[in-house]
Amino acid sequence: MLSPLNVLVPMKGSTTLFKNFEWIWPQTPIHLGYIIVVALVARWLMRKGIDQLIKWMNSRSAKRPAPEVNRTGRAWSDIIGRGAERQTKRATTMGRLMSNISVALIALIAIFSGFSAVGIQLTPVIASAGVAGIAIAFGAQSLVKDLLTGMFLIFEDQYGVGDVVEIDELKGTVEEVGLRTTRLRDFNGMSWYLRNGEILKVGNITQGWAQETIDIAVHQSEDPQVVMRVIRKVLAEVDQDPAFAESLLEEPTVLGVTDISKGVMTFQVSVKCVAQSQFDVIRTTRRKVKDAFDEARIRGAF
């Protein structure tokens, strides 16, 4: 019968971390191998479980009856994050975060189990970790703040990859959302790295709806009633245009004359659209109004 092989590591002091270090052949290698196998299986099962959870969340989102029975319903659906594409991105981001956390926990448990298997006393390790943790906590408060804020940004879905946002007066497109930093590319092409803990306010242009006003100027000698009648006819055409069926949330309206000065009479039009789609509507409306004014012989502001 094989006798235990005890290996003592010489270290100064009467009490050391490796004082009870013990290697028993073949029990210790088998025990360590068992710990590694269990850790790998647990990691595989955890990732498979998270993948199935993400698939279930996406399928549930796809099967949910769409509340988009009218234009306002589409905006509300986007605000609460029920859009299938956005829900998929959010679920994927959350799944990646859960997977990383679970892998770290499994690795930590496996390491401590391996220490115990070779007879290393865990009490000094835990005590030392506690003291070191307190010291590190004071020196890494900003890092902890960044990590916690990043988790809330992801879970609350304040913004996601591809969103156009304004963060502390910096405007651009979100390219990456991490636990510690957010990467933003502004409209000049510069890439910005923002610490999550320093983000105090966020304006998301992509989520929900956007309401814009269009100023239309004509010569002040024109009849306001005639001008408004022509503009309403153009707005009705824009509202019925199939190209904007998924963009316009309400029929565009004429607010009336907002200013008369220096020979110019200004009318204002209000449009309410799904976020980021208002620009095409505005450009098309201006072009159609110009064509309608030419046909009706209405002079512009010149």
Image (tube, helix red, strand yellow):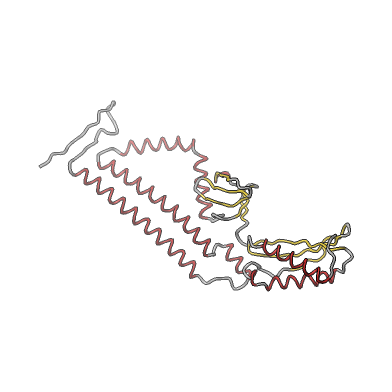
Point out residue 235 in the picture as x, y percentages from the top left corner. Answer: 73, 70
Q: Is residue 45 left or right of residue 227?
A: left
The residue shown at (61%, 58%) is 206
The residue shown at (22%, 32%) is 8
In-front residue for pair 135/24 = 24
In-front residue for pair 223/166 = 223
Residue 133: quarter of image: top left
Residue 71: quarter of image: bottom right
Seen in the picture, residue 230 relative to 47 is either above or below; the reply is below
The residue shown at (22%, 44%) is 29
| Placement of the N terminus among the 4 image quadrants | top left
Q: Is residue 116 left or right of residue 232?
A: left
Q: Is residue 224 left or right of residue 78?
A: right
Residue 234: quarter of image: bottom right
Point out residue 288 in the picture as x, y percentages from the top left corner. Answer: 74, 68
In-front residue for pair 103/222 = 222
Point out residue 146 in the picture as x, y percentages from the top left corner. Answer: 52, 44
Seen in the picture, residue 237 relative to 10 is either above or below; the reply is below
Point out residue 252 in the picture as x, y percentages from the top left corner. Answer: 72, 68
Seen in the picture, residue 56 relative to 233 is either above or below; the reply is above
Total residue callouts: 0
| Placement of the C terminus among the 4 image quadrants | bottom right
The residue shown at (56%, 62%) is 80
As drawn, the residue found furthest toward the left would be: 1
